[in-house]
Image (cartoon, grey):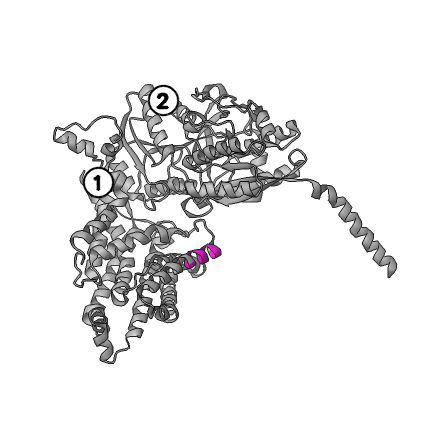
Amino acid sequence: MLELVTISTLNGVLYGMLLFLMASGLTLIFSMMGVLNFAHASFYMLGAFFGFQISQIVGFWPAFIVAPVLVGGIGALVERYGLRNVHQHGPVAELLFTFGLYFVIEEVVQMIWGKGPVDYRVPASLDFSAFTAFSTNYPAYKMFELLTAIAIFAVLLAVLTRTRVGLIIQASLTHPHMVAMLGHNVPRVFMLVFGVGTGLAAVAGVIAGPALVTQSNMAGLLGPILFVVVVVGGLGSLSGAFLASLLIGLVQTFAVSVNLSVADVLGGIGVAPPAGGPLSDLWNVTVAQIAPIIPYLLLVLILIFRPTGLMGTREH
Amino acid sequence: MISRFSTMFCAVAATVVAALPAAAQDTVKIAYVDPLSGGGASIGEIGLKTYQYLADWTNAHGGIAGHKLEIAAYDNKLNAQETLVQVQKAIDSGIRYITQGNGSAFAAAIEEFVAKYNERNPGKEVLFFNYAAVDPILTNEKCSYWHFRWDANSDIKMTALTNYMKTRANIKKIYLINQDYSFGQSVRKEARAMLNAKRPDIEIVGDEVHPLLKVTDFSPYIAKIKASGADSVITGNWGQDIALLIKAAADAGLQVDWYTYYAGGTGGPTAIKQANLADRVFSIAEGVPNDPYEPAREFEKAFRAKVGVSLFYPRAVNEIRMFVKAADEAKSVEPTKVAAKLDGMNVTVYNGGEGFMRSDDHQFFQPMYISSFGPISKDQPFEEENTGWGWTEKGKIDTPDTMVSTSCKMNRPS
C-alpha cells in the first residue's frame, strides 16, 4: 500500500509539473489579454517537434534551449501580426482566431512530420535510473522533468514578484488601462507575455516529447485539461495554476489506482445494489475507469461553487 | 525529315495499340478504411503499406482475374461515424471491396452498414474483408454473409494462449489490463472464464480497463500492477497501447511475464529489449517469421527489403491470395460471385498448413502459433526493429484445435 502511494505520488507530481509548464503561460495570456488561447497546446506540440528535429542535428541539449526560443518567437509574431489585429473585433473573434490556429498548426505539423509518431528518444546522458523506490526504478529523465518544472516556477515567481517587469505585468493584469495611461507600452507587454507563454509551452513539449509520444494528435490529448487547470487555479494566479496542476496530476494518478465502485460502497454500508437491470453497469464502474473525466467534474464543480478558482482574485 | 516523323508516328501508334488492352482492363479497387491519423496512425500506416505491397505483388503475378488490383486509402480517424462516412465515400466512387481491421467497434459498424446496403441495392453488393478486428461477436450474434474474417477471433486466441499458460507452473497471480471497448471487454471476460476452467489455482489479482489509444503515460497502471504482486499479465492491447504499456514497464523495471495478442506491433519489440525481458513476452499469431517454412521466409525477406518493416499481418497475405483465387475461379470480380467462392474455401495458408473459411460464420481457421521474444540463434534470420532479438516459436495449435463453435444464423442471399 505504502509502495503504491509513494509511486503514485511521484507520478502524480510529475504529471502535475508538466501541466504547470503549459498552464503557466496560458493563465498569464488568459488573464492579461482575456484571450482563451485554444492553440496553446499546439505550441506545446510545436515545441516537441522542433525539439525532435533540432536534436536530430545538434543533440538534445542545444534543442532544449533553441526550440523554445524559436516557438516563443513564432508566438510573439502570431500576437503581433495576428491577434493584435483581431483584438479590435472583440473576444469572440479572438477565440475563433486561436481555434482556427489550432487546426492550422496541426495540419502544418502533419504535412511536415506526417501523422504517425516520430522517433524522439530520451538523450543518452539521461537514460539511466536515478533511484529505486520499493524496487521500482525511477528514470533520471523524469527527475530532470521535475526539476526543470520547479526551476521554471521559481524563476517565474521571482520575475513576477521581484522585478520591474513583473510589476508592470502584475499591474496590467488588474489595471491595464491605468498602466497604459502611465506611459507603458501595453501592447508590447502583451506580445512579450504571449511569446514567453508559448515558449514555456514549448519547453514542456521538448521535455514531454521523448517521455510521451510525439505525434500530431498530442495537442488534442492535453489541450482540454489545460483549461481545467487555469479555471481551477484561478485566473492570472501563478501559484493557483501551480496548485491546480499538482492537484489534477495527483487526482488523476490516484484515481487510476482506486478500484472502488458504487456497488462496493453500498455493500460496505450494508445495502445490496440491485443485481442486473439496466443500471447494473453504473453500479459496477470503478473510480479507476472514470479517472480521465474526474478533472472535468472538478471543473464543473469549481465553476458552480467558486467561480474565481482556488486562488483567483478577479471575477471575470 | 518526313521519314523521321513517320517512324515516330509509327512508334507512338504502336505504343497506343499495345497499351489498349491494358487500358480496357478494369482496375479492381479495395478501400482500406483504417486510422491514418491520431493514436492509431502508426499501426494504420503499416497496414496500408502491407496492402500496397500485396497489390503490387498480385499485379506482378498476373493480377486478379485479368484485372489490376489497387488499394485506395481512407482515414477513419478511429471514429465510428467517420468510418461510415468513409465507407460511403468509397462506395460512391465505385469501390465494392472494403477492408478494415483496427477496432472491432468500427468493424461492427461496417458489417452492419454493408449488410443493409446490400439488402437495399441488389446487384451492387459490397464485400467486407476483415483482417484484424477480432471481437467474437462479428461472427456470432452479428454475423453477416458479406463479412469475411481472416484473423483468428479473440476466443480462438485466448483458447490457444490459455492452453499454453496451463502448462506454465510458475504462473500464480495474473493481472488483466485491456482497452475499454468491445474487444478489450471480451478479452477480460474470456480470460477470466478460461483461466477458471483450466487453472483454477491461478489468482486474478487485477482486472483493469483503460481508455482506447488515449493514455500517453502508463506509469500509474504499472505502479498498480507492481503493487498487486502479479507475476504475469494478460493484455489484448494493440497499437501504441501495447508499446507504451511495455515502455512504462521498462522504465519502472517491472519484471513479469506478458501474455499478449499484439506485442509484435510497432514499438513493442524495442520496449521489450529495453526492459530486458528475454523470452518473457509471449504473443499469439498466425505466423512466426523465424519458422523454417521456406515460402513464408522468402516472402518475409522480400517484404522487409521493400517496405522496411516486418510483416505484421500474414493474415492479409491470406486475404489477398484467397481473394485472387476466388476471383480467378469465378472468372469474375463481381462481389456476389467472389463471395460464393470464398464461402467454405480451403487453402494452404501463408505459414504452411491447412486453412479454411468456415461457411457457417465466415470465420477463417488456420494453425496458430505462440512465440516469445528474445535473443535468436544463427539459423533464425529475422530480428525485429534492429534489436538483435526476434520471435521464436514456443507452441503450435493446429487448425482442428482452434475450432470454436458459433451461434451464427447466417442469412444467405437466395
Q: Which residue is mark 1?
A: A4
Asked if residue B371 lies left or right of residue A150, the reply is: right
Q: Residues within 10 Å of mark 1 (few under 14, many from 20)?
A: many
Picture coordinates of residue A93 (x, y %)? 35, 64
Residue B108's place in the image compared with A170, above or below, is above
Which residue ends up furthest to the bottom in the rendered image?
A183
| Residue B103 occupies quadrant | top left
CA distance for labels 1 and 2: 30 Å
Q: Chain of mark 2?
A: B
Asked if residue A120 lies left or right of residue A295, the reply is: right
Residue A182's place in the image compared with B56, above or below, is below
Q: Are marks 1 and 2 in contact (CB under 8 Å)?
A: no
At mark 2, the secondary structure is loop
Say what amino acid the circle numbered 2 marks. Answer: Lys
Asked if residue A108 lies left or right of residue A126, the reply is: right
Instruction: Please report the residue visible at 66 percent of the width from the left and 33 percent of the height from the top.
Output: B65
- The reply to whether residue B361 is visible in this rendering is yes
Residue B125's place in the image compared with A235, above or below, is above
Q: Chain of mark 1?
A: A
Magenta residues span A104-112
Q: Main secondary structure of the magenta part?
A: helix
Q: Quadrant of the N terminus of chain B?
A: bottom right
Which residue ends up furthest to the front in the rendered image?
B120
Picture coordinates of residue A173 (x, y %)? 22, 68
Of the pair A196 and B324, the residue shown nearer to us: B324
The tag on residue B166 is 2
Instruction: Please report the residue visible at 38 percent of the width from the left and 49 percent of the height from the top.
Output: A213
